[in-house]
Amino acid sequence: MNDQHNPEFKPTKTVPNTHVDLSDIINLFDLEKRAAEIMTKMAYEYVASGAADELTVRWNRESLDNLKLNPSVLRDVSQLDTRISLFGDELPYPILIAPTAFHKIMHPEGELATARGAGVASATYVISSFTTTPLEEIAEVATQPLWFQLYVQDDRSLVKDLVQKAEAVGCRALCVTVDTPVPGIRNRQDRVNFRLPDEVKAPYMHGLGDQKKLLTWADIDWLNSFSNIPVLLKGILNPADAEQAVQAGVSGIIVSNHSGRNLDTVPATIDVLPGIANQVNKRVPLLMDGGIRRGTDVLKALAQGADAVLVGKPVCFGLACGGADGVSKVMTILRTEFELAMTLTGRTTIASIDRSVIWKPA
Ligand SMILES: Cc1cc2nc3c(=O)[nH]c(=O)nc-3n(C[C@H](O)[C@H](O)[C@H](O)COP(=O)(O)O)c2cc1C
Ligand SMILES: CCCCC(=O)C(=O)O
């Protein structure tokens, strides 16, 4: 059972407590429980909620849980190599920090803490367009690669300026989010009347969803025409769109349903991944996110065709509970669990993680 559906999770405090003892946080579900106790109700509801009836949120987890593993025994597992290469950078392990908005509502140090935590954990951090800290300041404290997530907002000249700023501060890739022409139905956010506190600003947030200026494939051509860094599309859920993305010349694809926050009842990402992987056939790197909470989930996603995964909510909860320490703890727990899953399934390299890792009935 996914802990986030536990009705006992009632955020009680109204003032964030940022001095939490993390020593008894053993897994990522522990962290969500702790976060529910200490975050403001508004921030907790913002992070934890999904769209409408949250069916997709649940399915992301259920579909991962329902895949069974098929270990191979008696292999030499004394040496593991978890490195991958993406767009010219070597990542020590295939887990990135997904872009999530508004970190200052989760922790007073906001995105600076996230970047520091990413640095400690040797993780690549994808900064959201709706960061509450200017890009230059994040870049100053970052010691690991940064990527930038782009919301194409109504004023296209500001969009171009933002892409150029992201490039100027050293972001290594641009993840264009394509699943949010307008925000989804977010009942839980509406119930708490979600809004940014006056003291928190999102300097690059101007406006999504003017019906006359919705994002289309023509915008992808336009972005590709001037971006000097690889362009990925984030939020692809079917092989036809993946094919069109490759034809449009994108450098990578992120299979994502936005953690079930936008269109409820779309399938779990792990379920659509194999079909998309078949279609893309390694022409561009394929990343995936949605419900990754265990090292075995990372292994399953790689087995089903992803080159790497991203994690969103757990990083927000880690940030809320412990700032940079909480963020690094999330990534380190997941990395350690993933290494153990590789060892126990007898797969010692990323290349050896293929569909044979998933158990199938005889
Ligand atoms: C609190 C929160 C804020 C998010 N903000 C953004 C965002 O600004 N841009 C974006 O492309 N995706 C955003 N996402 C989606 C994440 O990038 C990612 O797709 C998703 O969280 C991954 O699933 P997981 O949270 O189950 O790991 C957000 C997700 C959460 C939970
Ligand atoms: C309207 C989107 C706001 C940021 C976001 O992507 C999210 O909350 O999921």
Image (cartoon, rainbow, N blue to C red):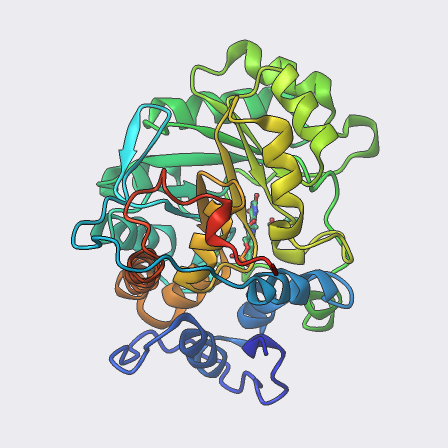
| Residue at horizontal 51 percent and vertical 55 percent from the top | 358
| Residue at horizontal 64 percent and vertical 87 percent from the top | 7
Of 283 and 79, the residue lying toward us: 79
The image position of residue 243, as x and y in percent, is: 67, 24
For the N terminus, the image quarter is: bottom right
139 versus 267 height, above or below: above
Q: Residue furthest bottom?
A: 8
241 versus 39 height, above or below: above
Q: Residue furthest front?
A: 362
Q: Is residue 20 left or right of residue 240?
A: left
Residue 152 shows up from this direction:
no
Q: Residue furthest top?
A: 225
* Quarter holding residue 66: bottom right
Of 350 and 83, the residue lying toward us: 350
For the C terminus, the image quarter is: bottom right
The image position of residue 325, as x and y in percent, is: 26, 64
Residue 35 shows up from this direction:
yes
The image position of residue 104, as x and y in percent, is: 43, 58
| Residue at horizontal 57 percent and vertical 59 percent from the top | 196
The image position of residue 30, as x and y in percent, is: 41, 78
Q: Across the whole image, how many numbered discs are drawn on residues?
A: 0
* Quarter holding residue 295: bottom left
Q: Residue furthest left?
A: 78
354 versus 153 height, above or below: below
| Residue at horizontal 63 percent and vertical 62 percent from the top | 63
Of 167 and 314, the residue lying toward us: 314
